[in-house]
Amino acid sequence: MKAAAAAGASSSRMNYSSHHSELDYGGEEEGKRDASRRRAQSCLGAARRSTFRASSRGQHVACGLAPLVAFAFLTLAHAITFPCVAPLLGPTISSAPSREPSPARSRTPDDDPQSLRLTIRGGDLAVSKTPRARSESGVDSTSDEPAYDLSGKLRMSGTPGRPLSTGMKVMMRFRINYSTRWGENVMVIGSTKELGGLPYPSEAETRRAIAAGKGKVMRYIADGNWEFVTVMDSAPPEMSYRYALVREKGEPLVEGGVKTGRYLDLDDFVRKGVSRQRLHTVGSSGSSSSLSAAASLQGPLQLEVRDQWRVSRQHGEDLVLRSDALTRVIYGHSRAEVQEEALSLQRVTHVSELVRRVDPPEGMRRVPTTRLRLSVERTRVPLGCAMAVECEALFTEVAVMSCTQFPAWELEVDAPRDLLPAQYKYVVVNLTTGNIMDREDGALRWLSKAEGITASSDLDSARGHHVVAVRDEATTDRWPVENREAFRAAAVSVPLFSLRSKHGMGTGEFGDLCLLVDVCAAVGLSMIQLLPTADTTAHPHASWKDSSPYAAISVHALHPLYMRLSALPNLPPDIAAEINRTTEELNAGADNSTVVDAKTGAVLDRPLDYEKVVGTKLKLLRKIYEASGKTVVESSAFAEFLVEQGHWLKPYALFCVLRDTYGCSDFAQWGELGALSFGQIDAL
């Protein structure tokens, strides 16, 4: 492993002092420049959540950022970037109770007691003042139209999501093995009302819930096995839960693991069960009617969940191993594609072809089977390899697991009941050669036979709709290599505005990261960490008061300061020429300019003129939007983007309009518009 190195930025004034020859396209040949640009567009287009990957000279560089969906600003990808450009960005409004604000603090523009009308004009979002009148019912109204009138182009019925219920009856058995002493009991606490109604059972919340008498005490069976059975007439699509050990005296012992507890996707179990019976194909959002019909035709889902106690890793290693930098980039890069290629080239055999054949019992046409879903979470699996299950009783050779939910590895198989119980272990196999590269230590794991969930139910009556979910733990005592070789990587931490190049408009921009990626790959650095890049515009005009990268007003929207305007698509020729001319003017003389900080005495190399750069970019963005905004708003790409991102974009855009209209970001001074609920905002 590479030795770790630390390089950080101690303040927002830090400037990158490398010369243009090291971080500029100017010294490259035309062919190299085009190759770098294509590589940059490829890596930025692959942005996912808080990281992005970049391939250079066979190395991968992870960049830790806030959500990077807005990297479309740089990749010339789609015109859906304009929804963020149109209102010039803003934060999410917190849901506030409907109340009349204090007259002393409430105000309207120009101190005129008039209401605001939000309308669409030529594809643009506009604000107009209209006298308010009071109707007979006492509800404020305007003389002609509703006070809030937005075009249907910006209307949405709500962010799509899962239904509140799967519509299917689910019989569940939770089972866990834990050796207790006399007077100790194992409890399960979760998000459903049957388990105490704790939405996100963190360790602290679980302790408080136990003290309040919530949760269910499990029943002891034998050999350290505990179980709890519950029946949900209409199961939710998902649930979370956590185990705890309670004693007659002393504080409860809560298991470790993920902060929000264990997660169980019930909708996935239901959909796959329905699909196997060829009843309905249920989409990702589910369908209560189709699921209810499925339930009436084939009976309830019997789900047995077999868990192992989770012990927290030392020094927060659980959190590190589940971070996006490791799971999506360092260890997750192209993993699924490599595995799919291995299957298509028949280097790996599908699990359905590995199950040992068993003759059906006399008088039966098919072999009775149990649907098994084995899962284990392990991040540090070498690229080009995969986790697999070694079980001679069930499979003719090792069965490779799926990594579509990496770092979780899953294997789903219909196991003949006559072959159970069976012993198994997890191994690591090379996807090219098929050789076993590593095998877990410790005792063999056991797959026991499935049983009916309740006394009145049996496996045959469920007609195959019985699932056993075996959720194992890849503890470090079973994989000693993770103790011997702790994860190490060298990284660099920089503020984005300091990555200056001749293509940036007076500041470092997202496009300049491509050159830094090349530098990092050349010297063996694995990750790039940036100072926050979220929007900080709390004042109606560009102000130095908003220059601190730590004063973010949104967790979703990126700062327009870092946009590369010349990379936006379909720029009118006159605006493109103005952008190029302005870029040269803002960069003129930057090579030799230095400023001495009055407070610290530090010499700043090419300092950023925040107000001038941001003000200039916003004016140019407005021109771009006026030229193309109507086309963008009416496009199908915009409609799709709004459906996917409307939960933050709509309140964000409204905030910008109200901030600029009232001249402040204090929503308490916006009158009744400062107390809109999310439902009211969504109805605009």
Image (cartoon, helix red, strand yellow):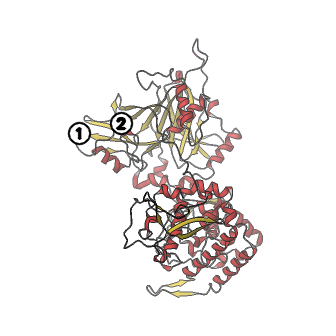
Tell which residue pokes out farthest to the top in this image: 363
Tell which residue pokes out farthest to the right in this image: 31
Foreground of the two, 281 or 678? 678
| Magenta segment, prevailing SS (helix, strand or loop) | loop
Q: Secondary structure at mark 1?
A: loop
Residue found 40% across the figure and 55% down from its top = 315
Q: Position of residue 474 (x, y in %)?
A: 47, 43
Range shown magenta: 360-366
Q: Secondary structure at mark 2?
A: loop
Q: Quadrant of the N terminus?
A: bottom right
Q: Position of residue 613 (x, y in %)?
A: 59, 79
Q: Quick one: label 1, few (<14), some, or many (20+) residues within 10 Å?
A: few
Q: Position of residue 15 (x, y in %)?
A: 54, 78
| Residue 56 visible in the picture | no
Residue found 69% across the figure and 77% down from its top = 579
- Please say if 241 is above or below 146: above
- Please say if 645 is above or below 516: above
Q: Which image quarter: residue 367?
A: top right
Foreground of the two, 284 or 243? 284
Three-letter amino acid code of the residue under disc 1: Glu
Q: Which residue is mark 1?
A: 248
Three-letter amino acid code of the residue under disc 2: Tyr
Is residue 175 found left or right of 459 in the rendered image?
left
- Please say if 401 is above or below 526: above
Q: Quadrant of the C terminus?
A: bottom right
Q: Which residue is mark 2?
A: 178
| Residue 151 visible in the picture | yes
Of marks 1 and 2, the one in the foreground: 1
Tell which residue pokes out farthest to the front in this image: 136
